Image (tube, coloured by chain):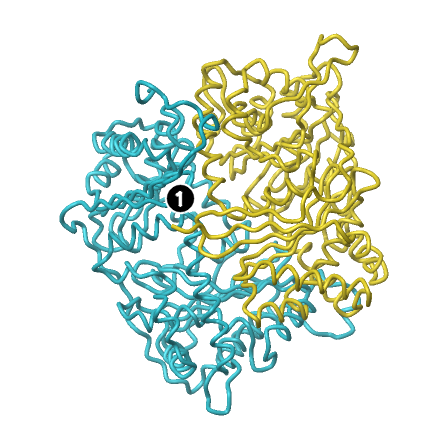
């Protein structure tokens, strides 16, 4: 078979290449083969996450259907239920081949995945088939409410999770990023089998999905299975619409008590966006700015550490997706208010004095090295390929940008990220017995 | 599968290079194994050391200087870890850097190898830490590390799954060294002086069994690390301490402890003893049995306690081979404690009675082997696999272990399950006043099967 059905993308500096093509169903397929590897990894993802809270019901009156709010946690609920079928569920089918299968739901996507050392084609056929074969009844939906109820409870006891959603809910007035991924016990109690079918039709259209695979595989093998198993879907997938939530935070402080050893905090700056999706360059610059400002070689980090205000869990990071973006500083501290005040003062100083070129260069080098290291990890490569595709980008775009960026770029970016009046602090205090 | 070679450098010190060019990185990890004694001060000082050592070294005497250096070396990743492997106190340090093939062009002018530079740094941290004129670690650095270790120890309380497991271990092993917290005791940590910590570091250099595992593409790194190690250990007195764990198959009456905390979800932990005599004794059969019982989504616990009974989101069993114990953990509604406990024990009883098919057994073995065959594709997993050979001395490649697992029969699994005895049940119960209406009404009629 000498026919070239794919496009090849390369990055010589990283020593990496992958192949991509569009399947006749409209599904994007990307394959990154690794010679000498035993493991193969594949992920089938839908652009449907916890922030997608509206569906268009077919035959609802208007030409393109009537928009309808769906309960919080529906994407995650659907993820659980797709594993089930009328006879053998997907876990049982994968168990026969030895593959490890899993799935997860995030703010922006739902991903189904497996990794295996053998029987790749058989496993890929199972993956494509079960995700395309929704089967739910009212009884199986009710059974899942107990299991997911326990998953929700489990997360409610995780302080890092609680402190983040508490912050997101004060940073955003109407954007659904503050909704917990699994919903609440009250919201999932409203989910019905019919509703899941509607969500499935809206979001699980091949045009709204991507298949990514890496490791001991070839594009020919992936194509053979895809051609045999993929089925076309009618209609157009749901589109995301901006929330318009770009104003200052609802409040600047939120707190609650939990059973924790030390106060846990998250300080965040909401970034007002001009268009709903930040390009790769801007996202990478945000990471570089945060590393330069508060990374482990920064004066701020040293000062907070020496004064006993943070510990090794201190972690600055940038969170962004469709229509939301924020810089976050997370950690445990005996005095969260003082720690936040110090970080705010350092941000003000950086805004006044500009980006330190040496700190920027260390940050750039570190990020570049970490990106190179990420290519070791074929488990996460398939996920990164999916994220890059949904963001409309190439897998190598981030590394390419990192080679070009300068301290002046970072200085401009700093000013976009930290607007006065756009920060808020979230604290979890230890609950007194 | 890349092969490993093992070279003795000094008594109880081995260097194990694995040469492979399949990765983007070069990594050196160091395992230090010491007996875990019922000596809170010693345990606490041991636990403090890897963290203290990985913050600086004589050449980069502050954390900020060292971190700047690591960032220049393309964000080389440095980590320290403390765990218990049976009654062995297991301390580790590791550094991972990008391989020199992937540096940016501007680096070549400096003509230094990033991989060799990082490996050398790790050795410097262990052998040439910052010392004051009096030969001791600086007081300020020790005080800072004591605070960080105390906070790390406390942070287990914030992770209720880990906390419940630790509480179960404290109760189950109250009379064994294994019952100690891996980080030592809070009071002992707080009382440590720089002189004491420095002495324990000197003891560690003499007494710990040490293994240096290198995963790298070139031969240059291995040659450099080996030469440096020979140099650093030349003329050093070495007296490696004997390692081993107590294996107790029956500790008398079952223990039950129930504690309340203001949490949303209850955590149930069951601790079982096995009749393993040492870590080699029927280790493969026990592993397969534990996996069939509560390993993956195909296991008895997942299929029944979660999927059929909807009692939990997670319910898993794990064998601690180096202590010969089996633990089951699950997160449940507090009022479902009895139902969950009975369901877990019923599944174990099923296996004891041979209530599983050859197909179920094959599924567990197939899944374990698939994971083992995959681990050589990830440098960290490959290093972790061989790390344990410091205790076993066997350096078995994963595929040989697969062959042993495939030889486990149904009778072996039944016999393994029959050697398992419940020792301790720990229940962390939720004490929460819940708002009405937020939650569903209590289910009626008990469990749905």
Residue B326 in the image, given as x and y percentages of width and height? 29, 46
User: Residue at point 51% right, 34% down?
Assistant: A101
Relative side of A111 to B38, left or right: right
- Kindly indicate which chain is depicted in cyan in the rendered structure: B
Residue B291 in the image, given as x and y percentages of width and height? 35, 39
The residue that mark 1 highlights is B262
Which residue sits furthest left? B252
Task: Give the image quarter of residue A361.
Answer: bottom right
User: Residue at point 28% right, 55% down?
Assistant: B170
User: Residue at point 43% right, 21% down?
Assistant: A143
Relative side of A180 to A69, left or right: left
Judge whether A176 appears above or below B275 on screen: above
User: Residue at point 74% right, 61% down?
Assistant: A347
Task: Give the image quarter of residue A235.
Answer: top right
Quadrant assignment for the C terminus of chain B: top left
Relative side of B232 to B174, left or right: right
The chain that hosts pointer 1 is: B
Mark 1: which secondary structure? Answer: loop
Residue B443 in the image, given as x and y percentages of width and height? 36, 21
Color used for chain A? Answer: yellow
Q: Nearer the viewer, residue A283 or B273?
A: A283
Residue A377 in the image, given as x and y percentages of width and height? 60, 49
Q: Decide: few, some or many residues near mark 1? Use Cα within 10 Å; few <14, some 14-19, many ≥20.
A: many
Q: Nearer the viewer, residue A30 or B314?
A: B314
Q: Nearer the viewer, residue A76 or A332?
A: A332
Q: Nearer the viewer, residue B210 or B250?
A: B250
């Amino acid at each position: 078979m000498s026919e070239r059905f794919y496009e090849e993308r390369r990055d010589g500096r990283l020593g990496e290449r992958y192949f991509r093509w569009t399947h006749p169903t409209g599904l994007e397929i990307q394959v990154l083969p690794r010679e000498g590897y035993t493991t193969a990894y594949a992920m089938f993802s839908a652009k449907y996450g916890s922030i997608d809270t509206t569906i268009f019901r077919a035959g609802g009156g208007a030409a393109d259907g009537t928009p309808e709010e769906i309960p919080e946690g529906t994407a995650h609920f659907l993820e659980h239920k797709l594993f089930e079928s009328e006879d053998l569920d997907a876990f049982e089918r994968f168990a026969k081949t030895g593959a490890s299968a899993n799935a997860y739901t995030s703010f922006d996507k739902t991903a189904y995945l497996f990794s295996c050392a053998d029987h790749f084609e058989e496993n890929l056929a199972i993956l494509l088939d079960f995700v395309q074969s929704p089967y739910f009844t009212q009884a199986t939906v009710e059974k899942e409410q107990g299991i997911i109820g326990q998953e929700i409870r489990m997360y409610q006891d995780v302080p890092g999770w609680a402190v983040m959603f508490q912050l997101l809910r004060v940073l955003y007035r109407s954007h659904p990023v503050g909704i917990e991924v699994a919903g609440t016990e009250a919201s999932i109690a409203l989910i019905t089998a019919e509703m899941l079918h509607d969500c499935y039709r809206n979001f699980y259209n091949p045009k709204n999905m991507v298949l990514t695979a890496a490791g001991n595989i070839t594009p020919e093998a992936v194509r053979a299975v895809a051609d045999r198993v993929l089925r076309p879907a009618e209609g157009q997938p749901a589109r995301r619409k901006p929330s318009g939530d770009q104003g200052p935070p609802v409040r600047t402080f939120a707190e609650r008590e939990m059973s924790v050893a030390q106060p846990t905090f998250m300080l965040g700056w909401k970034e007002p966006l001009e268009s709903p999706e930040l390009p790769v360059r801007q996202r990478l610059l945000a990471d570089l700015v945060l590393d330069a400002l508060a990374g482990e070689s920064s004066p701020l980090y040293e000062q907070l550490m020496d004064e006993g205000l943070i510990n090794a869990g201190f972690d600055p990071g940038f969170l962004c997706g469709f229509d939301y973006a924020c810089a976050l500083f997370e950690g445990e501290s005996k005095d969260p208010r003082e720690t936040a005040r110090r970080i705010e003062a350092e941000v003000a100083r950086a805004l006044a004095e500009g980006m330190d070129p040496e700190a920027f260069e260390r940050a750039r080098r570190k990020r570049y090295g970490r990106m190179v290291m990420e290519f070791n990890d074929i488990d996460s490569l398939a996920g990164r390929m999916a994220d890059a595709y949904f963001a409309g980008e190439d897998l190598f775009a981030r590394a390419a940008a990192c080679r070009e960026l300068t301290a002046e770029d970072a200085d401009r970016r700093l000013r976009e990220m930290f607007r006065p009046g756009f920060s808020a602090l979230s604290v979890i205090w230890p609950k007194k017995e | 599968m890349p092969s490993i070679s093992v070279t003795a450098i000094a008594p109880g010190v081995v260097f194990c290079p694995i040469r492979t060019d399949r990765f983007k990185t070069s990594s050196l990890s160091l395992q230090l194994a010491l007996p875990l004694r019922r000596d809170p001060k010693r345990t606490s000082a041991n636990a403090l050391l890897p963290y203290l050592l990985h913050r600086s070294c004589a050449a980069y005497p502050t954390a900020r200087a060292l971190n700047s250096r690591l960032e220049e070396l393309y964000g080389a990743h440095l980590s320290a870890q403390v765990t218990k492997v049976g009654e062995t106190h297991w301390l580790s340090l590791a550094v991972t850097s990008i391989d020199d093939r992937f540096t940016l062009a501007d680096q070549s002018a400096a003509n230094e190898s990033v991989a060799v530079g990082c490996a050398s740094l790790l050795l410097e941290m262990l052998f040439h830490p910052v010392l004051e004129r009096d030969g001791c670690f600086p007081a300020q650095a020790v005080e800072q590390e004591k605070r960080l270790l105390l906070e790390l120890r406390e942070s287990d309380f914030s992770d209720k799954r880990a906390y419940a497991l630790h509480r179960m271990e404290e109760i189950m092993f109250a009379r064994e060294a294994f019952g100690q917290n891996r980080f030592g005791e809070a009071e002992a940590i707080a009382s440590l002086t720089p002189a004491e910590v420095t002495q324990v570091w000197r003891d560690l250099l003499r007494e710990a069994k040490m293994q240096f595992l290198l995963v790298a593409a070139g031969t240059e790194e291995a040659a450099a690390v080996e030469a440096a190690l020979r140099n650093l250990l030349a003329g050093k007195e070495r007296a490696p301490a004997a390692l081993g764990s107590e294996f107790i198959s029956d500790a008398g009456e079952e223990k039950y402890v129930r504690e309340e905390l203001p949490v949303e979800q209850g955590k149930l932990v069951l601790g079982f003893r096995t009749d393993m005599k040492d870590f080699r004794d029927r280790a493969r059969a026990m592993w397969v049995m534990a996996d069939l019982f509560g390993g993956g989504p195909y296991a008895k616990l997942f299929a029944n306690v979660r999927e059929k009974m909807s009692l939990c989101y997670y319910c898993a069993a794990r064998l601690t081979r180096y202590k010969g114990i089996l633990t089951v953990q699950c997160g449940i509604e507090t009022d479902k404690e009895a139902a969950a406990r009975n369901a877990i024990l019923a599944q174990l009883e099923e296996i004891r009675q041979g209530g599983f098919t050859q197909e179920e057994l094959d599924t567990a073995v197939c899944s374990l082997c698939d994971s083992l065959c995959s681990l050589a594709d990830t440098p960290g997993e490959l290093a972790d696999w061989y790390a344990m050979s410091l205790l076993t001395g066997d350096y078995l490649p994963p595929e040989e272990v697969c062959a042993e697992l495939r030889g486990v029969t149904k009778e072996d699994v039944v016999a393994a399950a029959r050697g398992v005895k419940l020792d301790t049940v720990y229940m962390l119960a939720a004490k929460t006043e819940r708002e009405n209406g937020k939650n569903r009404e209590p289910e009626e009629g008990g469990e749905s099967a």
